[in-house]
Amino acid sequence: MPSETATSARKIFEETSLITGRQIRMARAALRWSCAELATKTGLSYGTLQKAEGSDGMPSMLTTNLALVKSTFEKAGIEFTDDDGMKMRKVVKNKK
């Protein structure tokens, strides 16, 4: 049975476009994550992620893995834009 993360990644792949190596680099920098941290969070190897980041366009990696990277960033507050960019989602704090 697929894990919840794998199921989430598959859903993202089916519903949205994927991301580029450039967007992976930008999102990781915005979150101040090392490549090793992203590897830990996704369960992908450091080498796989480094290779994906080396491309400005669509990385040559399994689409399910790319969807997994995208969903990991989105859960951390990253929104990807259609113009090969990204932005941080605004966090609204409750006023008490």
Image (cartoon, rainbow, N blue to C red):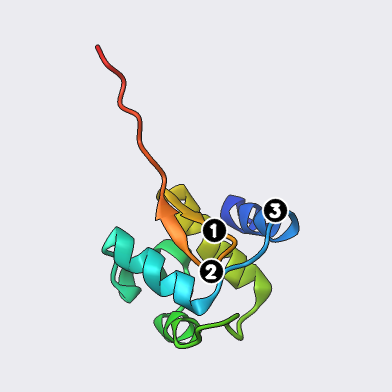
Dot 3 amino acid type = Lys
Looking at marks 1 and 3 on the same chain, the residue that comes earlier in the sequence is marked by 3
Q: In the rendered view, does 25 fall on the left or right side of 60?
A: left
Q: What is the number of the mark on residue 11?
A: 3
Quick one: label 1, few (<14), some, or many (20+) residues within 10 Å? few
Q: Secondary structure at mark 3?
A: helix
Q: In the rendered view, does 25 fall on the left or right side of 32?
A: right
Q: Position of residue 88 (x, y in %)?
A: 38, 50
Separation of marks 3 and 2 at Cα, in angstroms = 21 Å
Q: Position of residue 81 (x, y in %)?
A: 54, 58
Looking at marks 3 and 2 on the same chain, the residue that comes earlier in the sequence is marked by 3
Q: Between label 1 and label 3, give the one nearer the viewer.
A: 1
Q: What is the number of the mark on residue 84?
A: 2
Residue at coordinates 57% horizontally, 69% vertically from top-left? 19
Q: Secondary structure at mark 2?
A: loop
Residue at coordinates 39% horizontally, 64% vertically from top-left? 27
Q: Secondary structure at mark 1?
A: loop
The residue carrying mark 1 is 81
Dot 2 amino acid type = Asp
Q: What is the number of the mark on residue 53?
A: none
Separation of marks 1 and 3 at Cα, in angstroms = 18 Å
Q: Position of residue 47 (x, y in %)?
A: 43, 86
Residue at coordinates 46% horizontally, 60% vertically from top-left? 86
Residue at coordinates 38% horizontally, 69% vertically from top-left? 26
61 to 86, vertically: above or below: below
Q: Position of residue 16 (x, y in %)?
A: 68, 57
- State yes or no: discs 2 and 1 in contact (Cβ < 8 Å): yes
Q: Is residue 74 visible?
A: yes
Quadrant in which the C terminus appears: top left
Quick one: label 3, few (<14), some, or many (20+) residues within 10 Å? some
